[in-house]
Amino acid sequence: MVRKNITPTPKKSPGFFRRFGISLLGGVLGAVLTIGIFYVGNGSLLSPNNQNASGSPSAGNTKVSNMKVDVNSDVTDAASKVQDAVVSVINLQKQQSQSGLGGFSDIFGNGNEDKQSQSDENGQLEEASEGSGVIYKLEGKTAYIVTNNHVVEKQDGLEVLLKDGSKVKATLVGTDSYTDLAVLKVESDKVADIKPATFGDSSNLKVGEPAIALGSPLGSQYANSVTSGIISSLNRQVVNQNEDGQTVNINAIQTDAAINPGNSGGPLVNMAGQVIGINSSKIVQTESNVSVEGIGFAIPSNDVVNVINQLEKDGKVIRPALGVSMVNLSDLSTEQLSEIVKVPSSVTQGVVVAKVQASTPADQAGLKKYDVITKIDDTDVSTGVELQSELYKHKVGDTVKVTYYRQDKKNTVSVKLSIDANSLKSNSQQQSNQ
């Protein structure tokens, strides 16, 4: 008989099965808990079926909101009324030409000044500068545009760029350097679809009211730009000189609407869409080199209308003249005051007559060299600019009262303004050339 080693199987009791079942259930629960923690740790428990390559449940599903926003405002309404009438004004000038061998001519001795000349009348014109303007009138076959005088200075030809991108040849009607205004004209059929801008009453403006500036800052690349701001102040006396040394005197509107090079000649507009000024200049830096922002100036619309009406009619503005050369009293030294002018020490402000031209209103009224003018009518004048400003409020043919000192004696004389400044200037130039 072969003996076999058999390991006996123990007999299972009822208690064993209960313990086995409990152990099995504990293991299953532990496994489920472990798997759950793993999914939660990996962000997969809540939406394990929404996974994509990026790992983000909403990648690629960004949308634009369909909410409608009402963007209409006083500014958008005002801009829409005048925007089509705003143009870019392009100043064209003759190219400088040089004969010989171009850049090498000086090396070979051929580049003297006599060889340099401007192109002739048939020569090519090139763009010298750009500004802005606004169409304000359609009459018959002509459309009129107002801009700044300094925009069209030294031009040999003019073009205007319309809002639709087309260019139209323009002709200069007239200029006024004193107020820095100019009027151009184009053929009306070129702008027949454009509604001209209208002028508002600048005498009704209030400090703090909204205003917008339109034009071409930095040139036609940014044509028809709109900036907004407020009326910062009124009646600002802005005095400077143009490139020809002529005085520019503007009783200006001050605004903080952004005005940049190229905006010159464009309109300043109120919330009714009316032109209340023509943008002219801005302060960039003070004399002490302090940078400045938000101080721009516009010629008031009431002054603009007065000037452009005269330019349309005569091509120039006719203003009266006294016929004197002037020096500010405050510019004289103590020695000059005591030995030459000899006015009382109480007289500290006024305008000294440096020269009286023959056969002029001043000459006929008896004014003489070294007289010190202190008033025009009832208005004090302390500088030549103030005197000129008061004088230009009158017309040729008017009579004004001039108060002046001749040494220590105060006098008053009536002066009939019988000659205009343009004629006086022409006569003066002719005399200086003889």
Image: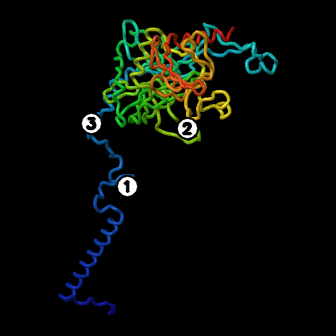
Q: Gap in Å between the C-alphas at discs 1 and 3?
A: 38 Å
The label on residue 55 is 1
Q: Amino acid at mark 2?
A: Gln
How busy is the neighbourhood of tag 1: few (under 14 within 10 Å), some, or many (20 plus)?
A: few
Q: Nearer the viewer, mark 2 or mark 3?
A: 2
Residue 339, image quadrant: top right
- Residue 378 x/y as whole percent: 45, 25
- The answer to whether any part of residue 169 appears in the image is no
Q: Is residue 79 shown above or below 56?
A: above
Residue 399 is at least partly visible in this image: yes
Q: Residues within 10 Å of mark 3 (few under 14, many from 20)?
A: few
Marks 2 and 3, how far apart at CA: 39 Å
- Residue 158 placement, left or right of 99: left
Q: Which residue is mark 3?
A: 70
Query: Dot 2 lies on which element?
Result: loop
The quadrant where residue 138 appears? top left
Compare marks 1 and 3 and give the one earlier in the sequence: 1
Give the mark toward the camera: 2 or 1. 2
Furthest residue toward right: 108
Secondary element at image label 3 = loop
Residue located 52% across and 10% down the image: 419
39 in relation to 374, above or below: below
Residue lying at 31% horizontally and 43% vertically, measured from the top left: 63
Q: Position of residue 72 (x, y in %)?
A: 29, 33
Q: Nearer the viewer, mark 1 or mark 3?
A: 3
Q: Which residue is mark 2?
A: 285
Could you tell me residue 123's position as x and y percent?
62, 10
Pick the front one: 14 or 432: 432
Closer-to-camera residue (12/195): 195
What residue appears at the point 68 percent right and 15 percent down from the top-left corner? 97
Dot 1 amino acid type:
Gly
Q: Is residue 55 above or below residue 152?
A: below
